[in-house]
Image (cartoon, rainbow, N blue to C red):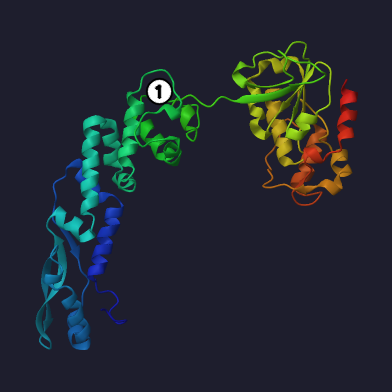
Amino acid sequence: MATASTPNWTTPRDVVARLRKRWDRGEFLSQVADGSDWEPLAVPLRGPKAGDITQHYDDVLAWATSWAPAAHRHLRIEYRRLGGRLAGVNNAPARVWIERRDDLFKLLGVTNTVNRYASLLAAANETLPPLATWMAENPMKVVQREADWPRLQATIRWITDYLGPAVYLRQLDVPGVDTKFIEQNRAILTTLLEHCLPEDRIEAEAARTDFAARFRFLRKPAYLRFRLLGGESLAGFSELTVRADEFTAPPPAITTVYVVENETTYLAFPDQPHSIVIHGGGYAVTQLSALSWLYDVRLVYWGDVDTHGFSILDRLRRSFAHTQSILMNRPTLLEHRGQWVKEDAPTHRPLATLTPDEADVYDSLVDGEFGPNVRLEQERVRFHLLEDVLNELR
């Protein structure tokens, strides 16, 4: 072992570490993938100088012994003459050679990994050449997932081959593959499909994180829950949950739509003539953007008085500019000071659609005027205030 006075002499471990770095970069597997001929690989060694033989004889002997050929059967050791008049002439290791590719893989302990990679690559070449091209260009990404690769490859093959009507991800018929597997491997599957599918089978406008939309699988339908107010009913029902894409017209005689966030508030919402109340469910209000008939009714939103409540209002108003808000103002907030709670992870982004009064409260919340992360939840607002506001709106 080298002492503190000989820190730069190359050890066998140093050589393996240097080769391991090249392996980790995928250099050697790339040569396997493209069928390159093997050229013997040389690694120069830093070793002792002539003067070290007399000054550090024991260290020199230990270093030379560490390079004994019998201990390195996968290497050929090249020697140089070292020494002179005082210490005599000795043969010292100067360079090691890896003569065969198999010797390199045995030295690094990756023979089985290489064989599995070669097998996976050969299978892809037979069944899905575009995938094989990607695998040849990204060998380390393959070996990092070698246990899952047969299922990944089968998934890519099924999707590229399937030309029938749109299906749900749950209907993807690959042994051992379910929606959980798809989600856990979404990033790599997205990359592979973008490489293997023609452009006309990829929804370019969909986010790469939205696997179903990007590759045109059917998506779970959005549902909207609403109550008819004022004693009205529809086919005998006062409350219904319907698919958003089928909610193409308002119930008969409806002229006002209220959107609220809290379920209890939704259930207790007072009767109003010619009105319905929709359970908004936070940012799920974006589902309302598909209801074009909302342009033709009075649309009133009531959410929590916190930064996300105003953000949801802003999102709804970007689809329907005529949206009104109720009970999302400074007086309501200050009147319920004893009911304030903390808002988790408040937002700070600009909200362009807020009215001056709404923006005043939002900016004050963001700036911490009332204290850190203040939130007034909808269900904590005294109910008579809602009744008063609704009477004013009639």
Is 253 situated above or below 71? above
- Residue 22 position within the rendered picture, expressed as x and y whole percent measured from the top left: 27, 55
Residue on which disc 1 sits: 201
Q: Quadrant of residue 68?
A: bottom left
Q: Secondary structure at mark 1?
A: helix
Residue 28 visible (yes or no): no
Residue 268 higher or lower than 183, as above or below: above
Q: Nearer the viewer, residue 166 or 9?
A: 166
When the figure is inspected, residue 179 is found, relative to residue 72, above or below; the finding is above
Q: Residue at x 41, y 40 (%)?
A: 185
User: In which quarter of the view is residue 84 placed?
Assistant: bottom left
Q: Position of residue 206 (x, y in %)?
A: 50, 28
Tell me the residue at 83%/23% (across/down): 271
Q: Residue furthest top?
A: 252
Task: Work out whether residue 199 or residue 174 is closer to the camera in this orientation and state it.
Answer: 174
Amino acid carrying mark 1 in the image: Arg
Q: Is residue 82 above or below residue 156?
A: below
Category of crowding for the residue at label 1, using alpha-carbon neighbours closer than 10 angstroms: few (below 14), some (14–19), many (at least 20): some
- Residue positioned 38% across, 18% down in the render: 164
Q: In the image, residue 315 lies at what x, y percent?
A: 68, 30
Locate the C terminus and report the quarter of the image it occupies.
top right
